[in-house]
């Protein structure tokens, strides 16, 4: 039996632990989305997550920001393709 306030599933119980697990789940989901070829969509969603977390969760913001920067290198850039 898990007691209130104890550690379960590798993260503390309560909102903070849930937030960290949810952040990890969403990051993994966006990485999987990018691997299916939907890099632009994954970047848009990561950017929205950054905006949402910016003030209230700096640690979560940093994780999504890092993902956004990694994925942005893989996006298509029409202006680059049109250069001679």
Image (cartoon, rainbow, N blue to C red):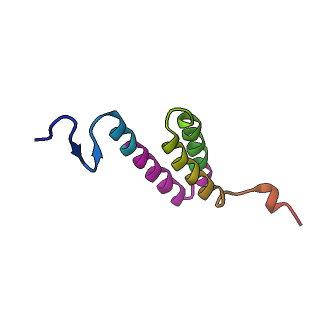
Image vertical order of residue 66 relative to residue 15, above or below: below
Residue 57 position, x and y percent, is: 49, 37
Residue positioned 64% across, 61% down in the render: 74
Residue positioned 22% across, 45% down in the render: 8
- Residue 49 position by quadrant: top right
Image vertical order of residue 2 relative to residue 28, above or below: above
- Residue 72 position by quadrant: bottom right
Which range is magenta?
22-40
Count numbered badges in the picture: 0
- The single residue placed furthest to the right in the displayed view is 84
- The single residue placed furthest to the bottom in the displayed view is 84
Residue positioned 30% across, 46% down in the render: 11
Q: Does the magenta stretch include residue 25?
A: yes
Q: Is residue 46 magenta?
A: no
**Most common secondary structure along the magenta stretch:** helix
In this picture, residue 28 sits left or right of residue 2: right
The C terminus: image quadrant: bottom right
Residue 18 position, x and y percent, is: 34, 39
Residue 60 position, x and y percent, is: 49, 43
The N terminus: image quadrant: top left
Residue 69 position, x and y percent, is: 62, 54
């Amino acid at each position: 039996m898990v007691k209130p306030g104890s550690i379960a599933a590798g993260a503390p119980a309560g909102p903070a632990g849930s937030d960290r697990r949810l952040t990890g789940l969403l990051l993994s989901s966006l990485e999987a989305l990018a691997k299916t070829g939907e890099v632009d969509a994954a970047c848009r969603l990561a950017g929205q997550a950054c905006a949402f977390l910016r003030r209230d969760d700096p640690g979560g913001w940093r994780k999504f920001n890092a993902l956004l920067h990694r994925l942005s290198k893989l996006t298509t850039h029409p202006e680059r393709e049109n250069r001679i």
